Image (spheres, rainbow, N blue to C red):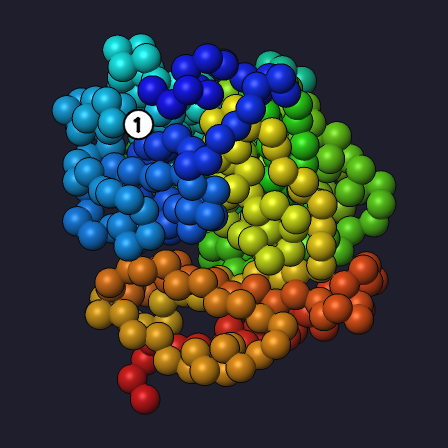
Amino acid sequence: MWEYLCSNVGYDPRMSITLPGPTLGVVGGGQLGRMIGEAVARLGVEVVVLDPTPDCPAAPVVSEQIVGDFDDPDAVHELASRVDALTFEIELADPELLAEASAEHDVPVQPDPGTLETIQDKLVQKEALADAGVPVPEFVAIATAEGLERVVEEFGGVMLKAREGGYDGRGNVPVTDPADAADALDEVGGNAMAEELLDFEREVAVMGLKGADGETRTYPVTETIHREEILRESVAPARADDAVVAEAESVAGDVLDFLDGHGVYGIELFETRDGEILVNEIAPRPHNSGHWTIEGARTSQFENHVRAVLGWPLGSTDLVAPAVTANVLGDIDETQPATLRGVEDVLAAADADIHWYGKDDVRPLRKMGHLTATAGSDDAAADSDVDRDALLSRAKDLRDGLTFRDA
């Protein structure tokens, strides 16, 4: 066991941290695991990932991959036996198994598996937030098509959500006509929650950070732009007025107080037409809406997540330049080997950086990478809507020049 983690459950400024550092185990080896590995290699932190896909996206940039399912007891215990600390980059991790492996191998796991268990079920998550006094949209459990019909009529439309397993728009179905209730319930798998369908001003997100010493920090409030329930672009700082930004930061602080365990949390929010902030969903891990922090913040969300998990001092979350991230999605009609074209234009751009996720196959609307456009040195401190509008257009233009289609 690495000396620092062996002797400290949290950061103690009297203790020295030496490099090379510890070995971190990550349940999940997708793009988030890949970016975790990229972020902490320079800190001397070794990363071992557990993922069921051989040669998963994280494999080329981490020390080792254990091939196994997220809920495979043998694989999770093997991971725990070979590392100094555990975390996860996907909500499909098994919280009970993580807690068991942590106890048996005397290896800390962060964020707390109990937090993961609460967040995994969207209904349980919303009930816990509401009980804690955190503002959320109106919601109700749905068990039958008849019940959904009544709720659609009462709310005038709902977003039907699978309670578990949904991501990137999968598992979310808007329902505005009671006659569509049965089909919608079948689509999400029957175990569902319905939320009032909000006519919101914009969606925003806050990447929140909890350290081992109880310190909390937030990154600047980010505007998130979705189509077909999939995040397309993120704008940082958000194009919202100061009062809305302050309220979003306040609500995010309440969420962080509610959660147990240290690390980064992606907190997705709605800004209503009257400026109210409501919590949409929480991810107990780095999040797509925070990818801009790699180029746009002093310390990226990925490095800070690992710092927090290991009990190291947290890095600055300050903005270094306004930034816009544009996701690169599959623009093809059926699954095929992934070859992205048009990359030379992004590489030639002085104000843009591209990130490739290493997935072998591309599917329609699958997240394959992202690019981030940042404000130049002459206007890095600029904070006007005009600057961010132009930056958003720039990022979209560069992204729209990329394609997986044959020439």
Residue drawn at point x = 56 percent, y = 53 percent: 294
Residue drawn at point x = 46 percent, y = 13 percent: 7
Front residue of this view, candidates 68 and 182: 68
Quadrant showing the N terminus: top left
Tag 1: Cα neighbours inside 10 Å, few (<14), some, or many (≥20)?
many
Q: Residue furthest left?
A: 74
The answer to whether residue 389 is above or below residue 79 is: below
Identify the amino acid type marked 1. Answer: Val
Quadrant showing the C terminus: bottom left
The residue indicated by pointer 1 is: 83
Residue 357, x across and y down, in percent = 37, 59
Residue 41 can be seen, yes or no: yes
Quarter of the figure with residue 27: top left
Residue 387, x across and y down, in percent = 77, 68
Residue drawn at point x = 76 percent, y = 46 percent: 273
The kind of secondary structure element at disc 1 is loop
Residue drawn at point x = 27 percent, y = 14 percent: 105
Residue 223 can be seen, yes or no: no
Residue 260, x across and y down, in percent = 53, 18
The answer to whether residue 79 is above or below residue 201 is: above
Residue 272, x across and y down, in percent = 72, 43
The answer to whether residue 268 is above or below residue 85 is: below
Front residue of this view, candidates 323 and 211: 211
